[in-house]
Image (tube, rainbow, N blue to C red):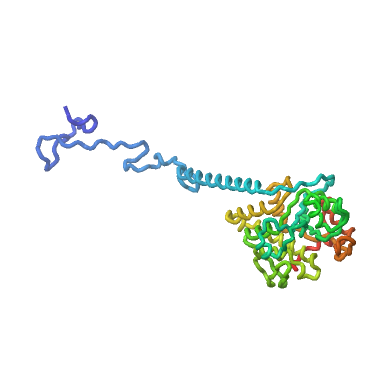
Amino acid sequence: MSDWQDGWYRPEPGQSGAGQVPSGGAGGGRAAWPEQPPVRRAPGLPATGRPGPGGPRAGRRRRFWGQPGRRGRRIALIAGLVVVVLVVAFAGSYFYLNSKLNRSVALPASSVQSAGQNWLIAGADSRQGLSKQQIVSLHVGFDFGTENSDSLMLLHIGSGRPVLISIPRDSYVPIPGHGSNKINAALGFGGPSLLIQTVENVTGLQINHYMGIGFGGLVSVVNQVGGVTMCLPKALHDYDSGANIPAGCHNLDGAQALAFVRDRHSFADEDLQRIEDQRAFLTALLNKATSPGVYLNPFVALPFGSAAASSISVDQGTQLYDLIKVALALRNPQTGTVPVANANYVTANAGDAVLWNRSEALQLFNDLKNNQQVPTNLLSGTKVG
């Protein structure tokens, strides 16, 4: 019996020399080494062992930018995980900041109805949270008595371009339950609720939301956003507010920003110019806060958002997305001041006050109430003093 397995070597019948030793071999009668067993090839492979045109690789699909399917699936998986992480981080940040909002203001019951959405934005002369050293360095004084509104603005968001109107803090108006007085006294008499009620009564506009901020809150917000650039046509030097800013463009830090929006003694028309500066600063601040350099940088966006959320007081119905809408609206609104008839109106109980031009003021507020375009002559615009 042959030692070789069947199929390895089997001389064909009549094949000559099938069992002969090759020339030079040992042993004349010894059978020759058989040929090597046949190469076992997968179907479709040519004799070379390389894939042919119809080989197994011919139907292999390539996916995702020309990469083979397995590698493409890995890339897709990594990209999907990155998207999931970003969405979770964004959602977590949103709910975290939304939970930090100080919803301490209750809107008063009102029968007033108007189109669009109206925000009352108040800057209060509150020193809450400031140390004695900060009070001295910020030049805000040690008045811890009645809190008044140092700045008052009305933002109307309707179907057209947003409108931002400043209400002079010394406006002489009727305050429910307190007779006529300067409008900033309403905050001290009855808090935000009475201030809102007063504004609704004299404007005929329904106040849908309220936002207030104190001295310390403004300083914190400005510092967290990295300062706000303002361009001054002339130098400001005012001891009372602490303003000491050269002419030209400067990136104001929190303390400088507070001094800038409080300074009125540097101007001939004092408070009327100051409220223009306040509008200009608010617009510049929100333009900075909503710029890609801030909201795409989590190391700036989160501290800024956290400082803003904890520094402002809002009504109980305000959500974070409402504040985002306000921030976008304040980037480029139409602006003006309530038309004034007499900026030095002498009163019997409140000293010199501001008396509105009643007919023009009514036209302005009626246009906002009906969501109509306000005539340009009633929108004075904003110019830094």
The answer to whether residue 33 is visible is yes
Q: Which image quadrant for residue 136?
A: bottom right
Image vertical order of residue 43 relative to residue 319, above or below: above
Which percent across, then down, holds residue 270? 79, 67
Which percent across, then down, holds residue 113? 83, 46
Q: Compare residues 174 and 134 and report the one nearer the observer.
A: 134
The answer to whether residue 362 is visible is no
Q: Compare residues 71 and 286 and report the one nearer the observer.
A: 286
Image vertical order of residue 385 relative to residue 202, above or below: below
Residue at 36 percent across and 36 percent down: it is 43
Q: Compare residues 71 and 101 and report the one nearer the observer.
A: 101
| In this rendering, position of residue 131 left or right of residue 350 | left
Which percent across, then down, holds residue 261? 73, 63
Which percent across, then down, holds residue 20? 14, 36
Q: How many numbered tags mark residues here?
A: 0
Residue at 70 percent across and 54 percent down: it is 328
Q: Which image quadrant for residue 316?
A: top right
| In this rendering, position of residue 9 left or right of residue 334 | left
Q: Compare residues 66 and 186 and report the one nearer the observer.
A: 186
Q: Which image quadrant for residue 374?
A: bottom right
Quarter of the image that includes the C terminus: bottom right
Quarter of the image that includes the N terminus: top left
Residue at 77 percent across and 56 percent down: it is 146
Residue at 25 percent across and 36 percent down: it is 37
